Structures are given as structure tokens and as C-alpha cells.
């Protein structure tokens, strides 16, 4: 599978997660370890939808959109870690979310470098 195909797949995942966060924010943020914060879920969902659409619609240069995805995943990881450390979020779920978001962020940055 080439880098462009992987990037398009990330776009579809972003849209799926974004839709879940917008349509069912209470359930989705709880599943991600962020407690009962539906407004946060809707905000993150809209962000994911914009990035997902950008990844699917851009034809020439996917790198900026992929970097935006990686930066947003790094932000999510930071949010989850801070919430877990401070006790605002459920530690077990938040730490799992931190690991997943960190991995996706590193993957996104690595893939963006390979799009040269």
C-alpha cells in the first residue's frame, strides 16, 4: 500500500471519528476516556471532519492536511495525559487514549515526511 492510499484511509478514519463525536458526543468522549464532556466531543468532531474532508479532497499536496491530523492527534494525547494526571479523566481509559493518540500522531508525521 502506498503513502497516498494510507493518507486517504486516514481521511476516512478522521471522518468516521468526527461523525461519531458529532452525532453521539456523550458516548464517544466517554469511550475515549474524557468523561462526560459532549461539548468537547462536538468540537473535536468538527475538527476531525474538516481534516478528514481536507485529506480526501486535496489532490496535489496532502502533506499539510496530514500534518494537521498529526498535530491534532498530538493535542489529543496532551489533553488526555493532562486529564489523567490531574484526575479530571478516568486514568485507565485516558492513558489508553494517550497511547493511541500518540501512536497515530507519530504515524502521521512519519507518513507526511514520506509524501515527498
Image (tube, rainbow, N blue to C red):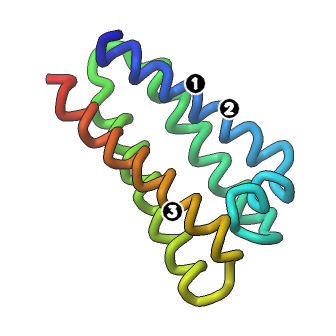
Q: Earlier in the sequence, mark 1 or mark 3?
A: 1
Measuring from the top left, give residue 62's x and y in whole percent.
32, 25
Compared to residue 66, the image places residue 92 above or below, namely below
What crowding class fits label 1: few (fewer than 14 Cα within 10 Å), some (14-19), or many (20 or more)?
Answer: some
Select label 1 or label 3 by which is in front. 3
Check whether the beta carbons of the residues at disc 1 and disc 2 lie within 8 A of each other: yes
* Disc marking residue 12: 1
Q: Residue at x 68, y 32 (%)?
A: 16
User: Upstream in the sequence, badge 3 or badge 2?
Assistant: 2
Q: Nearer the viewer, mark 3 or mark 2?
A: 3
Q: Place residue 14 in its image quadrant.
A: top right
Residue labelled with disc 2: 16
> Considering the numbered disc 1 on the image, is that residue within a helix, a strand or a loop?
helix
Left or right relative to 46: residue 70: left
Q: Which mark is residue 98?
A: 3
Q: Quadrant of residue 23?
A: top right
Marks 3/2 in contact by CB < 8 Å: the verdict is no
Amino acid at each position: 500500500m502506498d503513502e497516498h492510499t494510507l493518507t486517504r484511509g486516514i481521511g476516512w478514519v478522521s471522518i468516521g471519528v468526527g461523525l461519531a463525536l458529532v452525532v453521539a458526543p456523550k458516548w464517544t468522549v466517554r469511550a475515549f476516556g474524557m468523561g462526560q464532556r459532549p461539548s468537547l466531543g462536538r468540537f473535536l468532531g468538527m475538527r476531525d471532519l474538516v481534516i478528514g474532508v481536507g485529506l480526501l479532497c486535496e489532490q496535489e499536496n496532502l502533506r499539510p492536511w496530514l500534518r494537521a491530523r498529526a498535530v491534532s492527534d498530538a493535542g489529543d494525547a496532551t489533553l488526555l495525559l493532562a486529564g489523567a494526571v490531574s484526575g479530571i479523566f478516568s486514568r485507565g481509559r485516558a492513558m489508553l487514549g494517550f497511547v493511541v493518540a500518540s501512536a497515530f500522531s507519530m504515524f502521521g508525521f512519519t507518513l507526511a515526511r514520506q509524501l515527498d
